[in-house]
């Protein structure tokens, strides 16, 4: 894999080298403005560019570059040449590796900001020395970063697959079905339930394909393929606006390349295209 990331909680002692700093102000990531593009600050310390973080965390090493995350107060004033951007909008600028570390940074910053006090007894928490965790100063409960697992599933029917639209999607965009896993559920049960709830279809041969951290705000998307097993599309009145069977010759606007939805869709399209000369008839 290109630029592997190695996670760690404490930096090497006396780290003097510049590092990549993923600094957030609320939801927005700080970038340096370069002609035609943006970059992640590569600096020894945020003070070097006139920035003071309220909290910062060591994240690990990307390739051979150390990485930190940091958080700014909402009202921080920054100098010229510094801007704040929505992380989603930066995918094409950052590329996969930096985008993924930035997503990790976003979740850790948010988790640390919202876990300064113990949820059990209300006393302040302190940093855990060996793990990515906080510990209550009084009752010693350990608090780990929270992840919300969500399934996402491409349902195939011969050479067709199901696409649907949520009311909150950008205009004209369609995607595959997704939803959060409920307590007490297996991933496969979550797939079956979501598909039944949202479009009233039955599926079979559910199999795992791949996953993607999705830091908006702290999901882990778990991608599946399933086959249509029965039923007629009947959309959930509030969660889904439209749903339809599509084939590779009639595709609407699809989700952006960075999303696992798009990767699952592209994978299916690739398979169908390479089989299209040998398979002509569908159920
Ligand atoms: Zn406590």
Image (spheres, rainbow, N blue to C red):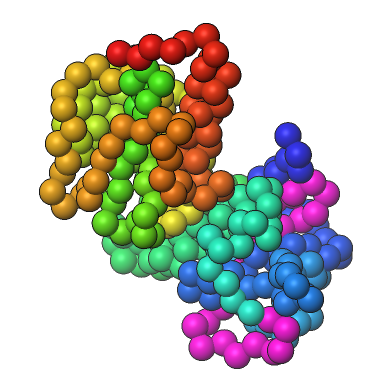
Residue 172, image x, y percentages: 37, 55
Q: Is residue 75 left or right of residue 207?
A: right
- Which sits in the foreground, 18 or 12? 18
Residue lying farthest to the top in this orientation:
278
In this view, 49 is above or below 7: below
Residue 225, image x, y percentages: 40, 24
Residue 132 visible here: no
Q: Is residue 159 left or right of residue 185?
A: right
Q: Is residue 58 magenta?
A: yes
- Quarter of the picture containing the C terminus is top left
In this view, 283 is above or below 268: above
Residue 223, image x, y percentages: 44, 32
Q: Residue at the location (63% across, 73% down)?
A: 30
Tally of numbered discs: 0
Residue lying farthest to the right in this orientation:
17
Task: Name the image quarter holding residue 164.
Answer: top left
Q: Residue at the location (72% across, 75% down)?
A: 32
- Quarter of the picture containing the N terminus is top right
Q: Residue at the location (68% across, 60% down)?
A: 93
- Which sits in the foreground, 64 or 179? 179
Q: Is residue 224 magenta?
A: no
Q: Residue at the location (83% across, 49% down)?
A: 64
**The magenta segment:** 57-82
In this view, 38 is above or below 201: below
Residue 281, image x, y percentages: 38, 12
Residue 283 visible here: yes
- Which sits in the foreground, 128 or 107? 107
- Which sits in the foreground, 168 or 218? 168
């Amino acid at each position: 894999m290109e630029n592997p990331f190695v996670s760690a909680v404490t930096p090497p002692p006396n780290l003097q080298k510049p590092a990549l700093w993923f600094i957030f102000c609320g939801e927005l990531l700080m970038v340096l403005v370069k002609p035609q593009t943006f970059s992640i600050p590569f600096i020894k310390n945020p003070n070097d560019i006139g920035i003071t973080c309220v909290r910062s965390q060591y994240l690990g090493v990307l390739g051979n570059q150390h990485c930190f995350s940091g958080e700014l107060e909402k009202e921080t004033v920054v100098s010229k040449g510094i801007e704040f951007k929505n992380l989603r909008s930066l995918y094409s600028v950052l590329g996969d590796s930096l985008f993924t570390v930035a997503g990790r940074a976003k979740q850790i910053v948010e988790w640390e900001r919202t876990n300064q006090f113990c949820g059990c007894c209300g006393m302040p928490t302190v940093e855990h020395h060996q793990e990515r965790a906080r510990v209550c100063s009084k009752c010693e409960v350990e608090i780990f970063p929270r992840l919300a697992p969500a399934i996402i599933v491409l349902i195939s029917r011969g050479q067709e697959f199901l696409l649907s639209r949520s009311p909150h999607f950008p205009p004209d965009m369609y995607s595959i079905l997704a939803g959060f896993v409920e307590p007490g559920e297996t991933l496969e049960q979550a797939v079956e339930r979501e598909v039944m709830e949202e479009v009233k279809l039955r599926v079979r041969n559910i199999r795992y394909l791949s996953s993607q951290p999705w830091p908006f705000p702290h999901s882990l998307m778990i991608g599946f393929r399933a086959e249509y097993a029965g039923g007629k599309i009947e959309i959930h009145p509030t969660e889904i606006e439209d749903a339809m069977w599509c084939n590779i010759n009639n595709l609407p606007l699809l989700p952006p390349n960075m999303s696992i939805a798009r990767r699952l869709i592209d994978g299916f399209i690739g398979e169908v295209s390479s089989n299209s000369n040998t398979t002509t008839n569908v159920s």
